[in-house]
Image: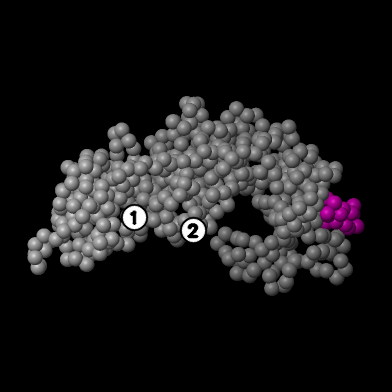
């Protein structure tokens, strides 16, 4: 180590709290600029103390480029451990790490790159407790923890609510907290853990599923028997709390303006396009959001069901209130393809059978999306997501979600699609003395039947509106086309008209001219379009209006 120079030290660093707690006099974070090369594996200071590097990385600072300081210079932050010196007993760093967790097994089974990723957990930053300045770093008795079996937890465990409130300082903000992202260090019981903890009723210990454990417990003499818990983030976040105020109608004008600037990202828009949404529908959603002063989308932290009652295929978005029982579109960044997003149903009283647990879920503040426990969990279907701290984009606007095209069962998880002969039927709709080109998008319910209809009003600008209509309101005395039997021409020359022999759903048969069919249906029925194409009638004068629908058919 002779001749090595010691770079500038960092006097305050919240990322080294775990090591600082155990070896405050031996740990030293340092900064080295990118242009000076990689951080040295070993350093020697002026007091002849030798340091070995534990971990290093390019630093990401908010408001700056990746690994840049205030002057825009790239730098590494490296963490060094004093292994020997005139007044220090010598310690072998590799041996020391094995007293924290079984890094040797991790390296052999998963490779050095996984070991480096797990070493990073030792330097996770601790957030401050709500309304306080002390870091959320705790040493707890090992008996306050228990290991539970994995059942779709995907990195999310549970914590008693009174314990969480006490850890966070018993403030009002602490009482609103219902989930935390954590790092756990338990050399003697389970090793090193990472993930989420969400509050759960009826437990008195912190429950850790196997998916939270990233490094197994030490196979040598454990460094300590207690569990060190580091809280890195508290949920709901301040952004979600602002959104909750908007949903309740008590947000300030400034909060509303700031919220409305957060429109759909280009990634989300591309996934929605891939799922069949048009630019007009998305623009209409943005216009409606501006009019209402509230977006119907947000980024939510994913957690595992603390009630074990949310059925497979459903989710529960906290804080939306009992009035919302619709479907929700979910995806996870980075999202680039249609398969990266899905539609799920918001669980209601019919799915969550007990009043007690239903009320418990509704006591959660806005900001979480709760996924069910099952053998085929939903998060991995969204770009390999999990529940150890992943954010999920959720959109619950009815007019947008109901227009998403369903290609297969995995696109529309837990949502019952009702088949009906009216779906995709086009017709002329008169509403509020306005004329619309109507299309039946989806059947919403049966007994009494109800359908979602998209109406396009064509005047100076094209505007989309949505209506919920019954079957009788849609048909308005019309019948549905079952099939076209034959065709003929009536008249001569320019007055010639095409007539189709139609068999209707009522089993009646009649000859109908093409102008009459156009009056009855704003878009050609599927059976009519199929017949016209098969018999090459599209070039006839009174059939040309159907050309613009050829692509759709």
- Camera-nearest residue between 331 and 251: 331
Counting the numbered discs, the total is 2
Indicate the position of residue 438 as horizontal and vertical percent values.
24, 51
Q: Secondary structure at mark 2?
A: loop
Residue that appears at 49% across and 54% down: 339
In this picture, which residue range is highlighted in magenta? 82-97
- Quick one: label 2, few (<14), some, or many (20+) residues within 10 Å? some
**Residue 20 in the image: above or below residue 460:** above
In the image as oriented, which residue stretches furthest toward the top? Answer: 355
Residue at image coords 55%, 54%: 383
Please state, as top left, top right, bottom left or bottom right, where the C terminus lies in the image: bottom left
Q: CA distance from mark 2 to mark 1?
A: 19 Å
Q: Magenta span has 88?
A: yes
What is the secondary structure assignment of the residue under circle 1?
Answer: helix
Q: Is residue 551 left or right of residue 310?
A: left
Q: Which mark is residue 146?
A: none
- Find residue 350 and report its image quarter: top left
Residue assigned mark 2: 337
Write the residue at 27% across / 53% down. 527
Q: Which residue is mark 1?
A: 281
């Amino acid at each position: 180590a002779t001749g090595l120079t010691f770079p500038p030290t960092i006097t305050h660093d919240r990322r080294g709290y775990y090591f600082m707690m155990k070896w405050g006099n031996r740990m030293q974070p340092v900064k080295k600029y990118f242009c000076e090369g990689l951080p040295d594996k070993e350093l020697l200071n002026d007091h002849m103390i030798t340091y070995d590097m534990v971990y290093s990385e390019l630093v990401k600072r908010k408001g700056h480029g990746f690994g840049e300081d205030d002057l825009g210079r790239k730098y590494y932050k490296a963490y060094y451990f004093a292994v020997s010196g005139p007044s220090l007993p010598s310690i072998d760093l590799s041996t020391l790490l094995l007293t924290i967790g079984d890094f040797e097994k991790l390296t052999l089974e998963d490779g050095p790159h996984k070991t480096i990723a797990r070493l990073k957990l030792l330097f996770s930053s601790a957030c401050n407790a709500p309304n306080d300045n002390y870091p959320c770093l705790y040493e707890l008795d090992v008996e306050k923890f228990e290991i539970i079996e994995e059942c779709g937890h995907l990195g999310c465990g549970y914590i008693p609510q009174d314990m969480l409130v006490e850890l966070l300082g018993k403030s009002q903000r602490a009482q609103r907290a219902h989930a935390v992202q954590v790092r756990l260090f338990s050399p003697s019981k389970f090793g090193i853990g990472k993930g989420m903890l969400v509050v759960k009723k009826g437990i008195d210990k912190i429950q850790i599923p196997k998916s939270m454990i990233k490094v197994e417990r030490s196979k040598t003499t454990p460094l300590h028997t207690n569990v060190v818990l580091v809280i890195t983030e508290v949920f709901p976040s301040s952004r979600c709390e602002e959104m909750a105020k908007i949903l309740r109608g008590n947000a300030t004008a400034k909060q509303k303006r700031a919220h409305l600037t957060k429109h759909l990202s280009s990634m989300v828009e591309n996934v929605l396009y891939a799922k069949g949404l048009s630019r007009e529908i998305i623009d209409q959603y943005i216009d409606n959001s501006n009019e209402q002063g509230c977006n119907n989308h947000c980024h939510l932290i994913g957690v595992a069901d603390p009630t074990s009652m949310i059925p497979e295929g459903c989710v529960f978005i906290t804080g939306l209130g009992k009035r919302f029982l619709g479907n929700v579109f979910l995806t996870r960044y980075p999202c680039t393809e249609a398969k990266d997003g899905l539609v799920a149903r918001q669980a209601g009283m019919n799915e969550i059978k007990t009043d007690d647990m239903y009320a418990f879920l509704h006591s959660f503040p806005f900001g979480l999306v709760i996924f069910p426990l099952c053998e085929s969990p939903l998060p991995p279907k969204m770009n390999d997501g999990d529940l150890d701290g992943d954010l999920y984009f959720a959109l619950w606007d009815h007019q947008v979600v109901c227009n998403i095209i369903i290609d297969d069962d995995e696109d529309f998880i837990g949502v019952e699609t009702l088949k009906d002969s009216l779906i995709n039927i086009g017709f002329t709709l008169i509403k509020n003395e306005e004329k619309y080109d109507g299309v039946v998008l989806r059947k919403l319910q049966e007994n009494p039947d109800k359908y979602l209809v998209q109406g396009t009003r064509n005047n100076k600008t094209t505007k989309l509106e949505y209506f919920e209509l019954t079957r009788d309101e849609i048909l308005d005395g019309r019948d549905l086309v079952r099939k076209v039997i034959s065709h003929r021409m009536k008249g001569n020359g320019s007055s010639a008209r095409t007539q189709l022999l139609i068999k209707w759903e009522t089993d009646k048969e009649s000859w109908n001219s093409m102008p009459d069919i156009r009056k009855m249906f704003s878009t050609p029925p599927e059976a009519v379009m199929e017949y016209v194409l098969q018999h090459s009638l599209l070039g006839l004068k009174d059939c040309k209006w159907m050309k613009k629908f050829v692509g759709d058919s």
